[in-house]
């Protein structure tokens, strides 16, 4: 998948002042560099094989299953536990204590002793214990209405209703997928790209969910039950409910955030530098553009802000089609001209959708950038104490000039407080002037802290070292570190106030989830969102004979 050129030509990257605004980050879409797509390209390219050595579940879906994925570095197995959960206990909240299904990704092939150990712990989730043989811990709940509809139809020998599948999009939704060493699990990921352990977990959960409903239908009505038609089966993804627990990640991992955004912006800059759009590239773009139109038509939301954004996106995509039909891709540097045009003719939602779309014809040009999306954050942690204060001021003014101009005494500027809940140790967001939570505030407001740093630097000479300043003001260590990181990594910092009264946490969630590869964002408030993952993707048994990476948008309707 290496790029055909060692250093492909590219235009100038978009400015962080443009890209790193929350409203724009909250309009990002999945693209070729998203982690789900990276995973499936890897599994297909490396010819991974999949087995289901254990599938012991009853008519209620209670029991155990194991899915084993075999790659060049050895096998990984998803151990699945199905439970009989009463409807009144089904909740999307992270504080729930019971679920329809629980899972652990096991490093290797589990023995019977391993399964017994996991049976006593995985269903308890945080209250249980896992070992370094496990790579992830997760749980999911059924979409009750659609799950029962599909089960009933299959048992009766009928296919489920396509419209209902479209409206919901999944049979189960995860409420947490924990990796990266949480709760005693190993801090290990297959490959070098981020979140591949979690993405593999969800990919196998999707297979389990569809197998489960077909299995339950056979047990309910062995003489009449049928399986789901392949074209309908692919329409099911895995749902996910994500809340504030994910939001601080973006702030707490500036180097990783930079590497994600820089890869995407570099991919865009490479495509914008393409001198001429070939007929093949134009056909690919026209195809994926039409599929994006159809995807937008089936994207529903209950949140007024997202409803407005979807309507704007539908209009934007129509405008792009008309513009392209008028000859926009003819001539030199067509993608550069198209992106320039979008800045004045499309909403933020449309502009960022277009960024994703123009990458689609150019996998050979951009896919190698996924190899740089991880980060060794420990290597970036050290503070350069020898730096002169004058140089630190230059970095501070470059990255946080907008923040230094704010009135930080205004209540609206400091209205929110990020803190950690006692019960679940999960991030929460409270109102500073309504709740007694300020003593528990977490350092998740770089803009305010940058202004405080600038204030205390005023009394210091430009020639003095940073180390001397920090000896006197150790409370600024974290902010000095962030400034130095941002001086090396231009996309490391959000150019917005993360504790303002009008800040929308869902913008932080949307940004991160777009890099996962999520679709159909449906905010349920400004603090949590439902999404769909792996919708339209091939299943494990299909990876060896499907067109590589042609699944991220739904197939065109007949005659499309």
Image (cartoon, rainbow, N blue to C red):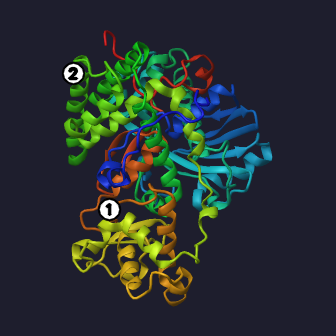
Q: Which mark is residue 322?
A: 2
Q: Is any atom of residue 151 visible in this view?
A: no
- Picture coordinates of residue 45, whole percent (x, y): 65, 26
- Picture coordinates of residue 530, whole percent (x, y): 37, 45
Residue furthest out toward the top? 559
- Disc 1 secondary structure class: loop
- Picture coordinates of residue 101, whole percent (x, y): 55, 44
Location of residue 200 with respect to 262 vertically, above or below: above
Q: Work out whether mark 1 precedes mark 2 in sequence or the reverse, and give the earlier one.
A: 2
- Name the quarter where the C terminus is drawn: top left
Q: Residues within 10 Å of mark 1 (few under 14, many from 20)?
A: some
Which residue bears the numbered disc 1? 496
Q: Which mark is residue 14?
A: none
Cα separation, mark 1 vs mark 2, equals: 34 Å
Q: How many marks?
A: 2
Q: Is any atom of residue 67 visible in this view?
A: yes
- Disc 2 secondary structure class: helix
Location of residue 461 with respect to 247 vertically, above or below: below
Of residues 113 and 493, the one drawn nearer to the viewer in this rendering: 493
- Name the quarter where the N terminus is drawn: top right
Of residues 85 and 372, the one drawn nearer to the viewer in this rendering: 372
Location of residue 166 with respect to 94 vertically, above or below: above
Location of residue 550 with respect to 181 vertically, above or below: above
Say which residue appears at 40% left-offset and 67% top-offset. Answer: 428
Say which residue appears at 64% left-offset and 58% top-offset. Answer: 181
């Amino acid at each position: 998948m290496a790029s055909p050129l060692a250093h492909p030509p590219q235009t100038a990257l978009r400015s962080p002042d443009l890209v790193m605004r929350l409203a724009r980050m909250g309009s990002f879409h999945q693209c070729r560099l998203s982690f789900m797509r990276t995973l499936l390209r890897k599994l297909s390219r490396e010819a991974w094989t999949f087995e289901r050595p254990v599938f012991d579940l009853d008519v209620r879906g209670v029991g155990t299953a194991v899915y084993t994925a075999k790659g060049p570095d050895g096998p990984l197995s998803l151990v699945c536990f199905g439970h009989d959960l009463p409807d009144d206990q089904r909740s999307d909240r992270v504080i729930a204590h019971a679920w329809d299904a629980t899972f652990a990704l096991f490093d290797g092939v589990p023995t019977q002793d391993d399964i017994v150990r996991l049976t006593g712990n995985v269903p308890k989730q945080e209250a249980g214990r896992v070992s370094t043989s496990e790579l992830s811990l997760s749980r999911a709940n059924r979409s009750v209405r659609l799950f029962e509809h599909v089960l009933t139809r299959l048992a009766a020998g009928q296919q489920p209703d396509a419209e209902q599948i479209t409206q919901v999009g999944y049979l189960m939704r995860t409420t947490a997928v924990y990796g990266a060493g949480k709760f005693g699990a190993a801090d290990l990921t297959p490959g070098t790209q981020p979140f591949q352990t979690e993405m593999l977990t969800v990919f196998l959960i999707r297979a389990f969910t569809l197998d489960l409903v077909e299995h339950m239908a056979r047990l309910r009505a062995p003489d009449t039950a049928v399986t789901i038609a392949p074209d309908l089966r692919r329409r099911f993804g895995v749902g996910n409910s994500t809340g504030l627990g994910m939001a601080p990640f973006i702030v707490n991992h500036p180097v990783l955030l930079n590497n994600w955004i820089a890869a995407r912006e570099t991919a865009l800059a490479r495509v914008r530098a393409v001198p001429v759009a070939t007929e093949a590239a134009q056909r690919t773009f026209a195809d994926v553009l039409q599929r994006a139109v159809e995807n937008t038509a089936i994207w529903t939301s209950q949140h007024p802000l997202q409803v407005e954004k979807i309507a704007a996106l539908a209009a934007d995509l129509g405008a792009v089609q008309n513009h392209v039909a008028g000859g926009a891709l003819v001539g030199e540097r067509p993608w550069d001209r198209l992106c320039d045009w979008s800045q004045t003719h499309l909403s933020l939602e449309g502009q960022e959708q277009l960024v994703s779309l123009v990458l689609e014809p150019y996998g050979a040009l951009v896919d190698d950038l996924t190899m740089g999306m991880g980060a060794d954050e420990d290597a970036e942690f050290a503070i350069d104490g020898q730096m002169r204060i004058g140089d630190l001021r230059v970095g501070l003014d470059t990255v946080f000039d907008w923040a230094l101009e704010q009135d930080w005494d205004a209540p609206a500027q400091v209205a929110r407080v990020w803190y950690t809940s006692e019960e679940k140790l999960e991030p929460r967001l409270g109102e500073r002037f309504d709740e007694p939570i300020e003593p528990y505030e977490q350092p998740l407001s770089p803009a305010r802290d940058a202004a405080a740093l600038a204030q205390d630097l005023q009394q210091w000479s430009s020639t003095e070292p940073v180390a001397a300043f920090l000896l006197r003001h150790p409370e600024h260590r974290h902010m000095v570190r962030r400034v130095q990181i941002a001086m090396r990594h231009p996309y490391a910092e959000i150019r917005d106030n993360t504790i303002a009264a009008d800040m929308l946490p869902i913008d932080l969630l949307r940004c991160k989830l777009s890099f996962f590869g999520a679709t159909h964002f449906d905010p349920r408030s400004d603090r949590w969102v439902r999404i769909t993952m792996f919708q339209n993707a091939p299943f494990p048994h299909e990876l060896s004979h499907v067109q590589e990476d042609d699944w991220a948008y739904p197939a065109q309707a007949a005659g499309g």
